[in-house]
Amino acid sequence: MNSEIDYNHIKKLLNFIDSSPSPWHACSKIAEGLEHAGYHQLFENETWNLEKDHGYYVIRDDSSIIAFKVGNKPLHQAGFRCIGAHVDSPTLRIKPNPVEEKSGINRLGVETYGGAILATFTDRDLSLAGRIVHKDNNNWLGCSSKLINLEDPLLRIPNLAIHMNREVNEKGLKLDKQAELPLILGNISDSLPGEDKFKQMLSEKSGIDNDDIISWELSVYDTQKAALYGAESEFFASRQIDNLASCHAAVSALLASHQSVAATNVCAFFDHEEVGSNSIKGADGSFISDILHRIAITLGCNDEQYKIALAQSFMISADMSHAYHPNFPQFYDDNHKILVNHGPAIKINANQRYTSTAVTEAFFIRLCEAVDVPYQKYVHRTNLPCGSTIGPMVAAQLGIKSVDIGNPMWSMHSIRESAGVLDHNYLTSVLDNYFAGN
Ligand code: ZN
């Protein structure tokens, strides 16, 4: 460990990621932290009452969450200060009829969720987490959902031995998504069919009667805990750094803003970013506009005042960015390579894959300079297609100014990603400054 590095904040991030193996768990963990800090949960099917300087949060369908603290000035005078990020990560999802019984082995069939580097899922100690839905006559839908985390290393995709895949080091590991991704669950037993055995596992872990379990959404995750690494423990490695690290920095900043500020500060964390965001709870759906409009109405704004509020609002779209990888220099623009532990990157793209403009970029730079945080500028190579974030769709939908930023990381969409300790401290302090209204 390096005595000059403050590891407190990164340890909190690593704990947060370890206890958030699925987007449903991440959302629940964020809500737990908000509750602890005195934030009150609001429900979309109930009437709201809001008071200035108080904190609230809303969850939609268990895995998207918007938290906000009402400012001390009317919205049409001070606007919203938002940070947007996503809680989901690329992975494998268990099919509804998952068990494939073959040659003495039970396997679980999966779909891919988002663009994972599939080869990294091999030879890992995998488990399952997500939500199961069970009968509940007290709910108008006739069912309720419950989080489940199987915790133990239950599953595996063993690599094919090199003796049968002699060119793996020259051609890379390619996996057929239908035939070669099913996960090994166990030996076939004579006493219990595989499907029943799997359901029994869910029942035992959740405490819900076998017959009451109706359906589920389960993510595959790596059970290896997050860890620091490097000669001076200046890096960390974990699953889901994209984008739980940004969520953590944002919500930490929201909770750190104890003093009364003029603007209404908002953290909006969405599920489904990795699959296009077009869903009931995705960034391209109605969630963010519904909630901001609802806040405005509840605080007494008329339609014009709401539009005035949006016109003086700002969003920081925070999502991880591509750190320069010294083993692969040919994939980076020499003038826009960003380095791990050199500060958050402002992401710029002329084709509006990112929302940054010269004006919003300058706004973010001034935030960094005010707290002595270094920043970098990232532009993707012109001859490579550029990724995107929730930024463009939220900014377009709301008509608010926005900048795309993100801390540099390696191995994006691997099951074991990696980033820098200092960058997490840097980003949190910039976001603290943003929510402090400076
Ligand atoms: Zn991301």
Image (cartoon, rainbow, N blue to C red):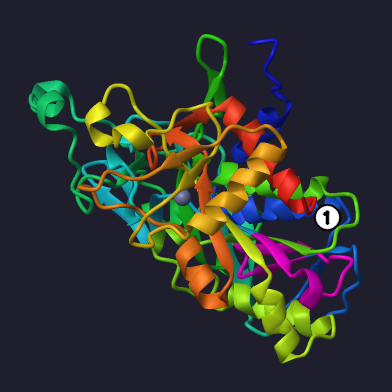
Q: Is residue 138 left or right of residue 362?
A: right
Residue 338 placed where, x, y %? 42, 33
Q: Is residue 37 left or right of residue 160?
A: right
The answer to whether one can see residue 49 in this image is yes
Disc 1 residue type (three-letter): Glu
Could you tell me which residue is drawn at 83 percent across and 66 percent down? 70
Residue 314 placed where, x, y %? 64, 63
Name the one closer to the observer, 87 or 72: 72
Q: Is residue 26 magenta?
A: no
Could you tell me which residue is drawn at 48 percent across and 34 percent down? 153
The answer to whether one can see residue 222 in this image is no
Q: Is residue 189 left or right of residue 311?
A: left
Name the one closer to the observer, 437 or 420: 437
Q: Which residue is mark 1?
A: 35
Could you tell me which residue is drawn at 61 percent across and 77 percent down? 289
Element at label 1? helix
Name the one closer to the observer, 193 or 348: 348
State whether residue 283 is above or below residue 194: below
Residue 8 placed where, x, y %? 73, 26
Q: Residues within 10 Å of mark 1 (few under 14, many from 20)?
A: some
Q: Is residue 414 left or right of residue 266?
A: left
Quarter holding the N terminus? top right
Q: Which residues are magenta?
A: 57-82
Could you tell me which residue is drawn at 41 percent across and 50 percent down? 90
State whether residue 354 is above or below residue 308: above
Residue 5 placed where, x, y %? 67, 18
Name the one closer to the observer, 276 or 22: 276
